[in-house]
Structures are given as C-alpha cells and as structure tokens.
Amino acid sequence: MSRVGRRPIDIPHGVKVTVNGDLVEIEGPKGKLTQKVSPLIKVKLSDNQIIVERLRDIRQGRSLHSRGSAASLHGLTRTLLSNMVEGVTAGFERALEIHGVGYRAEVKERKLSLRLGFSNPVNFDLPEGVEVDTSREAQVTQIKVRGVDKQLVGEVAARLRAIYPPEPYKGKGIRHRGEGLRRKAGKAAVT
C-alpha cells in the first residue's frame, strides 16, 4: 500500500466534498474544483475525512506512474485531492520577479502587459481562475500569481517565466522569487 495514499485527508470546516462515482467535487470559501479519479481507485468519505483506497492490488494501482494510461493512481490521487482541499481553503501563490532597467508589468482587465525591452509590450491573457497582482520595489517588479488550482497557478507562472527567462550575463529577465542564477563573466579583452 502507498504510504502517501493511505493517509486520510482531513476536511476543514466550511469545505463540502461530494463523491459521485469517479468524480470528486470539492467546494470551499475560495472556489470549487473537480477531479476525475481512475477506476482502479476508490474515494470514500468517513468521519470528516477523505479516504483513498485501491480496489485491487495490481501493479498499475501501486505504481507512481503508469505507462500508456492516465496517471491517476493511489498516492497521486491522494495528493491531488489534498491539494484541492488546500486550494479551496487557502489558495496557492507563486511569486515572480522581473529584473532589468525599465522592465515592468501591469494588469489591465484580464490581461497582463509586460514591458521587457522588446519593441512592443507582451500581452498575456490570464486564464479563468487565476489572479495576478503586480508591485514595484527598487529595480525589481514583483508579480504574484494566485488561484485555487495548484497546477494552473504553476503553469501560468512557468509560461510567464518562459517569455523572458533570466540571462546569465546581466541577470535580466523573469525568474521565480528566490531562484538562484549562476552568473557568467563577459568576454575579457586581450591585452
């Protein structure tokens, strides 16, 4: 049995969990999320807890990943449901920093406008369920990506970083807060 999968998930006050066959729906103060689970996995509710069990003890149900099928197995299913409970109660946040002179970001309606030294500003459409806040401190612009779906928040943060990844010579670009950057020396003049 999976060590992660056999741990029950406590349901906090104000969170409503509905299990309808292979569809789990979790609703809380911040929003509502749904997750489809594998037919090899059974999700049940008991004593204000979510319990995830394998129906059969076969290799595919025990594995951390499965080849050729959707990765919705015991430990993974428990982790996804736990993230859903955390998302609808507290939410998730990823922080990004924009380094560079004159580089900035601002939110207009459902678009994030980035000025990153290109000839035109880059407009990034925000998906439904994600909010972005921007602030400026010294020479660094902060971007905070927030939402209830951990996967969606991480994906938006990664797509924003991919617009202008940090370059190793001057350190300009978009990076995650706290991300280390190995700097390189420029060309040395020969004397």
Image (tube, rainbow, N blue to C red):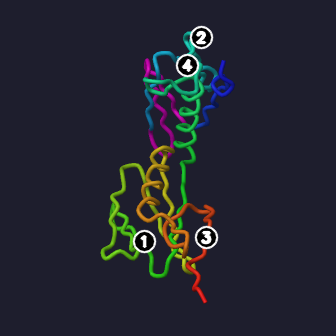
Q: CA distance from mark 1 to mark 4?
A: 45 Å
Instruction: Give the quarter of the figure containing the C terminus.
Output: bottom right
Q: CA distance from mark 1 to mark 2?
A: 51 Å
Question: In the rendered structure, which amino acid carries the disc numbered 3?
Answer: Arg
Q: Secondary structure at mark 4?
A: strand
Question: Principal SS element in the magenta part?
Answer: strand
In which quadrant of the rendered view does residue 113 lie? bottom left
Q: Residue at x 45, y 37 (%)?
A: 33
Q: Position of residue 11 (x, y in %)?
A: 60, 32
Residue sitting nearer the eye, 98 or 13: 98
For label 4, the residue is 44
User: Which dot, 1 or 3, sits closer to the camera?
Assistant: 3
Q: Secondary structure at mark 1?
A: strand
For label 1, the residue is 105
User: Which dot, 4 or 2, sits closer to the camera?
Assistant: 2
Q: Earlier in the sequence, mark 1 or mark 2?
A: 2
Instruction: Give the quarter of the figure containing the N terminus.
Output: top right
Q: CA distance from mark 4 to mark 2?
A: 18 Å
Q: Residue at x 45, y 76 (%)?
A: 103
In which quadrant of the rendered view does residue 52 lie? top right
Question: Does 35 appear above or below 46?
Answer: below
Q: Secondary structure at mark 3?
A: loop
For label 3, the residue is 183
Magenta span covers which residues?
15-32
Q: Earlier in the sequence, mark 4 or mark 3?
A: 4
Q: Earlier in the sequence, mark 1 or mark 4?
A: 4
For label 2, the residue is 57
